[in-house]
Image (cartoon, rainbow, N blue to C red):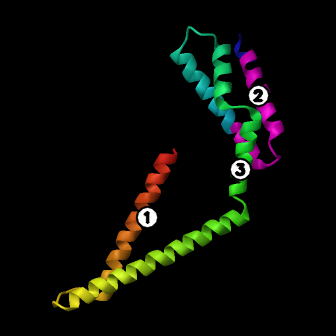
Amino acid sequence: MSDLQIEEMIEQYLKSVRRALPDSLDSIGLIDELREHIHEALSEKVTERPEESPLSLLHEVLDETGQPIEIAHAFEQSIAMRSPENIYRRALFAVLRLVVVVGFILLVAWYIYGASTNPPSGLDFPTVVVVLLILTLFEYVLRSWQSRRTSE
């Protein structure tokens, strides 16, 4: 099968996906990403198994990619997650988490400061709070970095 025929099959698949998607700029981006993914996956398979027909490898790639309706459904769910009410809910959760963390830091700082005042030491309350805030910020940055690495 020629490269032109393979491209036609890919475009036919992408048309099916496009028909199942809502009209938006996001869906245009998805089609472009999907095209790139299909080409990369096909290229890898052809390199790994050059003895097999590119057509059968393309069918394998398209099967692995999924049915157009499944892709559209997953895309619609991702759009729904970006809806204003979900964004509001996540922002509210982030603020509540921040309040709990700051409250915990103040409680621990108060406890450490109180424990350090019995035997005289060089710790003062603002220093303890700042150190705990820095440690919390470091923990937050580390978790964000880890979650980004696992999602890649």
Where's the N terminus, which quadrant? top right
Nearest the camera: 51 or 70? 70
**How many marks overall?**
3
Q: What residue type is disc 2 on?
A: Tyr
Quadrant in the rendering for residue 92: bottom right
Distance CA(mark 3)–CA(mark 1): 27 Å
Residue at 74% in and 17% down: 4
- Per the image, the residue denoted by label 3 is 77
The magenta segment: 5-32
Q: Dot 3, crowdedness within 10 Å: few (<14), some or many (≥20)?
A: few
Against 84, residue 45 (above or below) is: above
- Mark positioned earlier in the residue sequence (3 or 1): 3
- Per the image, the residue denoted by label 2 is 13
Q: Main secondary structure of the magenta part?
A: helix
- Per the image, the residue denoted by label 1 is 140
Residue 110 position, x and y percent, is: 33, 86
Query: Is 11 within the magenta?
Result: yes
